[in-house]
């Protein structure tokens, strides 16, 4: 795995635990020589991941749409900064550049970015691993919703398992290394009753 896209909050969250978790992610990516691909901001959890990658000698690529450049406060020390025109181009660029996708704690923007790429995996549009880093059990309510979706038959277990979950970045990256994408050719034909 040469690069990982990290989706995460443009806010720092309510507790230091989120920033500390983001720092651990940056350190681990640098240690494994995995390039960070992210939204290029210097603020919130986003900024903390990038700072930590750079402080630990790693490589960080930021992708930022022109119209958000001021608002999201572009990180001034990135290894590479790519400016695009739209939000769609930003996500497409990040999807192209990354070999896997991780959501750290974040808000609606983080979920939107993660769910787009995860649903594309379900459709077989790519075979790259997707995972939730469950820092401080932040994603427990989402995991509960997954159970509800399974019970109510709006989700297949095979596809639920395509969203890997781990509380530790090292564990999640190890899961990425051994990830075997399921055969999704049957997606539209399997028994969905
Ligand atoms: P948030 O998790 O809401 O703090 O947002 C984190 C990242 O998601 C930021 O880089 C935002 O630019 C991005 N973002 C926010 N809203 C959206 C959206 N509707 N679609 C795609 N990305 C978004």
Image (cartoon, rainbow, N blue to C red):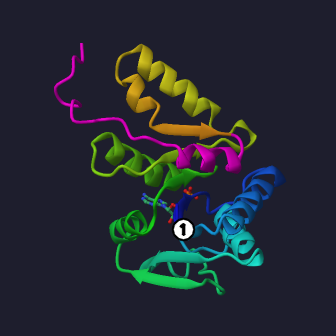
Q: Position of residue 155 (x, y in %)?
A: 37, 25
Q: Position of residue 184 (x, y in %)?
A: 27, 36
Residue in view at x 54 percent, y 58 percent: 7
Residue in view at x 59 percent, y 38 percent: 165
Image quadrant containing the C terminus: top left
Q: How many numbered tags mark residues here?
A: 1
Check residue 61 for magenta coloring.
Answer: no
In this view, 86 is above or below 123: below
Residue 15 in view in this figure: no
**What range of the chain is rendered magenta?**
167-193
Q: Position of residue 27 (x, y in %)?
A: 75, 64
The residue labelled by disc 1 is 38
Horizontal side of residue 182 vs 5, given as left or right: left
Horizontal side of residue 56 vs 127, given as left or right: right
Horizontal side of residue 26 vs 121, given as left or right: right
Would you say the magenta stretch is mainly helix, strand or loop?
Answer: loop
Callout 1: SS: strand
Residue in view at x 54 percent, y 84 percent: 80
């Amino acid at each position: 795995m040469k690069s990982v896209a990290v989706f995460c909050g443009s806010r720092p969250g309510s507790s230091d635990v989120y920033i500390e978790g983001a720092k651990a992610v940056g350190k681990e990516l640098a240690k494994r020589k995995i390039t960070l691909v992210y939204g290029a901001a210097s603020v919130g959890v986003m900024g903390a991941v990038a700072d930590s990658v750079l402080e630990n000698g790693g490589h960080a690529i930021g992708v930022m749409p022109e119209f958000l450049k001021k608002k999201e406060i572009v990180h001034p020390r990135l290894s590479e900064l790519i400016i695009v025109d739209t939000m769609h181009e930003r996500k497409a660029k990040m999807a192209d550049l990354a070999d896997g996708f991780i959501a750290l704690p974040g808000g609606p923007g983080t979920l939107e970015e993660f769910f787009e790429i995860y649903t594309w995996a379900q459709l077989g549009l790519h075979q790259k691993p997707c995972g939730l880093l469950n820092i401080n059990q932040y994603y427990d309510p989402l995991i509960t919703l997954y159970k509800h979706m399974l019970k109510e038959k709006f989700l297949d277990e095979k596809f639920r398992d395509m969203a890997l979950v781990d509380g530790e970045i090292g564990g999640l990256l190890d899961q990425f290394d051994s990830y075997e994408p399921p055969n999704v050719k049957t997606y539209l034909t399997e028994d969905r009753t």
